[in-house]
Amino acid sequence: MKVNEIMAALELKHPGEKEYLQAVREVLESVEEVYNQHPEFEKAKIVERIVEPDRIFTFRVTWVDDKGEVQTNLGYRVQFNAAIGPYKGGLRFHKAVTPSMLKFLGFEQTFKNALTTLPMGGGKGGSDFDPVGKSNAEIERFCQAFMLELWRNIGPDTDVPAGDVGVGGREIGFLTGMYKKLAREYNTGVLTGKGMTWGGSILRPEATGFGALYFTSQVLATAGKDIKGKTVAISGFGNVAWGAATKATELGAKVIAISGPDGVCQIPGGITKDMIDYMLVMRASNRNKVQDMADKFPGQTTFVAGKKAWSVKCDIALPCAFQNELNEDDAKLLLANGTWCCCEVSNMGCTPEAIHAFQKAGILFAPGKAVNAGGVATSGLEMTQNAAHLAWTGEEVDAKLHWIMSSIHEQCVKYGKKADGTIDYVKGANIAGFMKVATAMLEQGII
Ligand code: 2IT
């Protein structure tokens, strides 16, 4: 394959789909050399097939807001690749959701899921519904209307959605309730991220952030460093940022900043348990303002409007919010302030230029599909518990999560070790994930 030729063809077929084309290019550039050593891949046109989703469902979602007004949104489910198992991946509710965004997420999910070692294919879905400012009742009505369309296309052995930005435990509850009502299927395994009393796995809410910190600790240990006492800047205050802040603090690091769309909340003394708990209140309020944290804890915090977490001097940067949230200027500012590690916890959190700046400077960098895979891995563990009709203890789930993150780290080392002994985690994760999916597709024939 020649990446530029593949990309030129793809750009003609999918004009303007910026995020999707960005994600595909990043993976193909990493795997080009290895791929070209496998003529059997070329013959089966694996790369031409692997970059396209198997199918996409697009549907209209109509619901009534609290004022009695009729609202119309668009809903999607991208079933990207099922070579390794049933489609698996989250639902994103955000005003900026487009097919391009969900295709990039589905594409990334396919390789991430392959890295987890569990039998899960890749999928993603969501809606341009904007949860900001919505009441609980509006969220419930929207989720019900969304599921009214989606239910026929999902199932415990076909496609298993979960949460993502704008979709947490509350939304999974409403979606699951409506699924059961419509499908008259009471199997607990059709969505993951469920409540603890109705099929959810202990630790699933924490898993993305916890797994990210287990992975970060291994990245540091491999480079002869320790997370204890290090300063950490985090973007976001959703479920992922909450889990990351919790585990970073538990491991002895000091979380000195969290940010939101309105600015950054600096916490020079390090985030406290009360503040971490308050992140959950902020998320549930649908206000989407990090200033709320500064207002709640005056004295311990300072709010700076319009600034990102990357303006704060820190050892370790953890993007935990949205794609492309850390750009080249942010990377340069972090580097100038002495940051020596960045682990992407959000999917494609850094722009290609930012990654290039980090790699050029030789600092530790690891990509989202490896760092954040603990979330979907624990969803996979939830599916296993549901299929077996039992529930594991927190210790059991945590031990498995630890093992999975170590295994992902090992795969990155295997495929990403450079001549000088350092690890290119981007290359390592991309090649490891790609090889697994490509081999599965090859073995299953031309379908
Ligand atoms: O990006 C992700 O891996 C997720 N949003 C979690 C997906 C899942 O199925 O748990």
Image (spheres, rainbow, N blue to C red):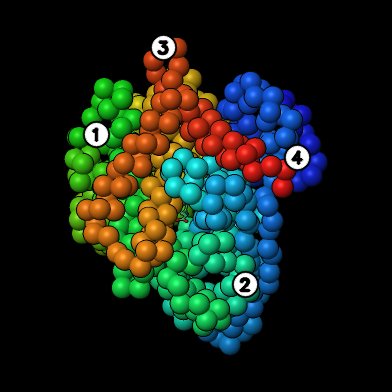
Q: Which residue is mark 4?
A: 10
Residue at left offset 57%, top offset 66%: 154
Which quadrant of the figure has residue 310?
top left
Q: Which residue is mark 1?
A: 227
Residue 85 position within the rendered picture, expressed as x and y whole percent measured from the top left: 54, 51
Q: Earlier in the sequence, mark 3 or mark 4?
A: 4
Q: Which residue is mark 3?
A: 420
Residue 253 position within the rendered picture, expressed as x and y whole percent measured from the top left: 22, 39
> Which-is-in-front pick, marks 1 and 3?
3
CA distance separating discs 2 and 4: 30 Å
CA distance separating discs 2 and 3: 52 Å
Question: How many residues crowd around disc 2 within 10 Å: few (fewer than 14), some, or many (20 or more)?
Answer: few
Residue at left offset 24%, top offset 57%: 394
Q: Which residue is mark 2?
A: 152
Q: Earlier in the sequence, mark 1 or mark 3?
A: 1
Residue 436 position within the rendered picture, expressed as x and y whole percent measured from the top left: 54, 37
Residue at left offset 63%, top offset 31%: 28
Asked if one can make out residue 163 in the rendered structure from this viewpoint, the answer is yes
Residue 11 position within the rendered picture, expressed as x and y whole percent measured from the top left: 76, 40
Q: Earlier in the sequence, mark 1 or mark 4?
A: 4
Viewer-side residue, 182 vs 290? 182
CA distance separating discs 1 and 3: 23 Å
Q: Earlier in the sequence, mark 2 or mark 1?
A: 2
> Which-is-in-front pick, marks 1 and 4?
4
Q: Is residue 41 left or right of residue 294?
A: right
**Residue type at mark 4?**
Leu
